[in-house]
Image (cartoon, helix red, strand yellow):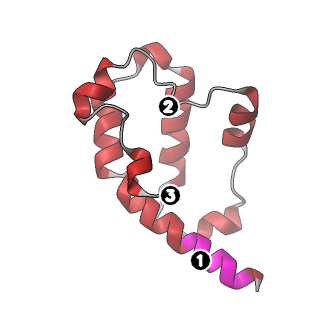
Amino acid sequence: MPSSAIEPSRPGQSGLRARRTLAGVVPSSPADHQRSGQALPEDVQALASEITWSQIVGMRNILVHGYFDIDTDIVWDAAMRDVPAIETAVRRLLKTLEKQSQ
């Protein structure tokens, strides 16, 4: 996923705050909800132990179920602080899985 995929559609934190919905962040269709609810097997998670899987699931649950209580400052901070490191770790995980499947 290119870094630009995580950037809000409007520049800066104010763009995120200005959006009345977080439709670009929260799954919108039943199929999206089903996919987001499917956990990675523990053995796959163990291959990337630097990823805080439980915190990712927790954030997802807040975004999906706590819509009116979402603090856009927290979402913005997480996106800017955490997502780049998670993206790097997931890329490493995918390479590991590719090597294992060969």
Number of numbered discs on residues: 3
What kind of residue is marked 2? Gly
Residue at x-position 69% and y-position 49%: 39
Q: Label 3, on which residue?
A: 1
Distance CA(mark 3)–CA(mark 2): 15 Å
The reply to whether residue 47 is visible in this rendering is no
Q: Of the two numbered discs 3 and 2 on the same chain, state the one appearing first in sequence.
A: 3
| Quadrant in which the C terminus is drawn | bottom right
Query: Height in image: 33 above or below 93?
Result: above
C-alpha distance separating marks 2 and 1: 27 Å
Residue at the disc numbered 2: 24
| Residue designated by label 1 | 95
Does dot 2 land on a helix, a strand or a loop? loop
Mark 3: few/some/many CA within 10 Å (<14, 14-19, 20+): few
- The image quarter containing residue 61 is top right
Residue in view at x 69 percent, y 56 percent: 40
Q: Earlier along the polypeptide chain: callout 1 or callout 3?
A: 3
